[in-house]
């Protein structure tokens, strides 16, 4: 398999880390993109220790200049970008009536506009090369809604619709675009989100009971789906939305 360059945002920990590790095992040259410098370096070191190639790159997806500078750094260190995985995300559990403009802005900037910025930067070269893989991490919240996650659900729904449109626009250029939607997954972000709730254990319990398999997902299970969609074997799959959620959604 050709050693193509893969960018994974939010790759320092959780689902993003497992995606970076999975792509490293595929032989991809991986840019571990994250603002968590120490953890990004550790993820990259894990890939290189296993015989792969990886570099940590600091990028703030809410800052257009940071995105441009960071992706240019990737090109300088690893070469042209062929695979983009938009995984960076953030949320807090709040009733919509308790949110404000500042909160909306942060959720949308990270979860949606960050996807627009990175995709806009890498897509022209993919089209010119006649090969590319874009895998965006959505959420089942964006497919069916999720209580206390109104703005996040909207942003993830936007990611799903955006990905389908990009898939249509670039299909003839050999570039695919797909969305992977995790259900409740045991990650540091999930633990941080529920930690702010007075009844954190009940929140986790409710999430678990809602899943037909009666457990939370594991980051590596999401990573396996992403790695497949980023592979050469998935060349005829585009514009699709795949839930990795233990059956939480089935449509």
Image (cartoon, rainbow, N blue to C red):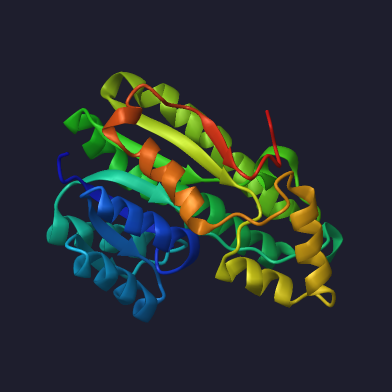
- In percent of width and height, residue 109 lies at 54, 58
Instruction: Give the answer, above or below, for where 130 lies relative to 157.
Output: above
Compare residues 66 and 223 and report the one nearer the observer.
Answer: 223
Instruction: Classify 115 as above or below 133.
Output: below
Return the x and y of residue 198 as percentages of the image width and height. Answer: 84, 77
58 shown above or below 26: below
- Residue closer to the observer: 213 or 101: 213
**Is residue 172 visible from the viewing direction of this image?**
yes
Is residue 148 something one can see in this rendering? Answer: no
- Relative image position of residue 11 (x, y in whole percent): 40, 63
Quadrant containing the C terminus is top right
Q: Is residue 94 left or right of residue 50?
A: right
Q: Is residue 202 left or right of residue 43?
A: right
Residue at 41% x, 25% y is: 237
Tell me which residue sits at (17%, 55%) in the image.
75
Quarter of the image where one finds residue 122? top left
The picture quadrant where one finds residue 111 is bottom right
Q: Quadrant of residue 119?
A: top left
Seen from the viewer's position, the closer of residues 135 and 201 is: 201
Q: Pick out the residue farthest to the bottom.
A: 38
Which residue corresponds to the image point at 30% horizontal and 58% vertical from the top-left?
Answer: 68
Drawn side of residue 183 relative to residue 149, left or right: left
Where residue 135 sits: x, y (%)?
42, 42
């Amino acid at each position: 398999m050709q050693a193509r360059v893969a960018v994974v945002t939010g790759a320092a920990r959780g689902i993003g880390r497992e995606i970076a590790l999975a792509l490293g095992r595929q032989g991809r040259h991986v840019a571990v993109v994250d603002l968590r410098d120490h953890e990004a370096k550790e993820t990259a070191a894990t890939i290189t220790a296993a015989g792969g190639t990886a570099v940590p790159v600091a990028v703030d997806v809410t800052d257009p200049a940071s995105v441009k500078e960071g992706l240019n750094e990737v090109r300088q260190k690893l070469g042209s970008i062929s695979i983009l995985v938009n995984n960076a995300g953030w949320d807090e559990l709040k009733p919509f009536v308790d949110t404000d403009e500042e909160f909306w802005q942060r959720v949308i900037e990270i979860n949606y506009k960050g996807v627009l910025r990175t995709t806009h930067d890498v897509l022209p070269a993919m089209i010119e090369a006649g090969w590319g893989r874009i895998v965006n991490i959505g959420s089942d919240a964006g497919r069916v809604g999720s209580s206390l996650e109104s703005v996040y659900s909207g942003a993830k729904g936007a990611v799903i619709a955006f990905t389908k449109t990009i898939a249509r626009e670039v299909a003839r250029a050999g570039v695919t675009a797909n969305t992977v939607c995790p259900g409740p997954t045991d990650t540091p972000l999930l633990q941080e989100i529920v930690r702010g709730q007075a009844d954190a254990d009940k929140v986790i319990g409710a999430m678990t009971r809602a899943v037909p398999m009666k457990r939370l997902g594991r980051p590596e299970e999401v990573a396996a789906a992403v790695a497949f969609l980023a592979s050469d074997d998935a060349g005829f799959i585009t514009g699709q939305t795949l839930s990795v959620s233990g059956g939480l959604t089935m449509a």
